[in-house]
Image (cartoon, rainbow, N blue to C red):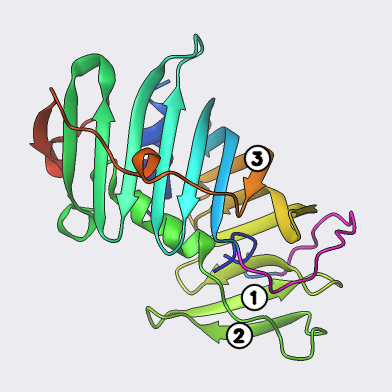
Amino acid sequence: MTIQESFSTVLKTLLLSVLMLSLSACATAPQPVPSAKPGKQVETLQSEVSLSVRSGDKSIGGRGYLIFKQPDRFHLAVFSPFGFTLMDLFVADDRITCLIPAKQTVYQGLISEIPASNALKGWGMMRWVVDSPPAPEDGKAASREYTAPDGKKEVLCYDDRGLLASKTNEDGDRVVYQDYHDRNGVAFPSSIEISNAQGDSVRILFDEPELNQPVEEAVLTPSLEGMEVFPLTAFRGL
């Protein structure tokens, strides 16, 4: 699985859940030339991130810290402008845990059990963003069709170095990967832009990401001590 290689109508709820708290055509990525080649795996990622969201005529931005570990574990801390944590989101397999430290509350359950209208449903789509379709065998294909593990058809577009520039699924969800750099021997994008058919989008900018460095288990495991626990379906934002 590589972050470089790989939303649906739930994109808006995904990003609003984070930030209310604080084209089938191929795209061409910018051309800084990383020394790393396609194919090396991202096992872990740790990075400060800037998030900007656009939905209709509204836009909002914020900052946070993202930690990822193979195969499907995420921790996103969302910060206030003053630096304290507004929310911690943890994902492991199909389970999501949302901590609101200021309220000493936790929302927890299975992504598959919550309705699409719930603001946390979209976190399940992050797996699609980091999913890793196999690279073209000849390393020269500009685009190709691919059937994802969920059965959906995708169009994958590559730049002239064989790095994934974008992918679009049959629902109109799209991810664009830009500005690749060599990070610990891995060609890694400095930004990822995710959009859906309705025009909602989010852009994630990575600030000096650390790849394939040790990640302590504690930072991927939520501490529920002293917290009041509710089901995910009860989450309505801050």
In depth, the one of 53 and 67 nearer the eye is 67
Q: Which residue is mark 1?
A: 156
Distance from the alpha carbon under mark 2 to that under mark 3: 28 Å
Compare marks 3 and 1 and give the one earlier in the sequence. Answer: 1
Q: Main secondary structure of the magenta part?
A: loop
Whether tag 2 and tag 1 are in contact, CB under 8 A, the answer is: yes
**Horizontal and vertical percent position of residue 127:** 43, 61
Residue at the image position 30 percent from the left and 61 percent from the top: 93
Tell me, for residue 138, which label it has, or none. none
- Residue found farthest to the top: 82
Residue at the image position 59 percent from the left and 33 percent from the top: 48
Does residue 236 appear to the left or right of 34 in the view shown?
left
Type of the residue with mark 1: Leu
Type of the residue with mark 2: Glu
Distance from the alpha carbon under mark 2 to that under mark 1: 6 Å
Does residue 161 appear to the left or right of 166 in the view shown?
right
Marks 2 and 3: which is nearer the front?
3
- Quarter of the image where one finds residue 112: bottom left
Type of the residue with mark 3: Phe
Q: Which residues are magenta?
A: 26-41
- Quarter of the image where one finds residue 95: bottom left
Q: Which residue is mark 2?
A: 145
Compare marks 2 and 3 and give the one earlier in the sequence. Answer: 2
Residue 234 in magenta stretch:
no
In depth, the one of 146 and 71 nearer the eye is 71
**Horizontal and vertical percent position of residue 118:** 23, 44
Does residue 143 appear to the left or right of 86 in the view shown?
right
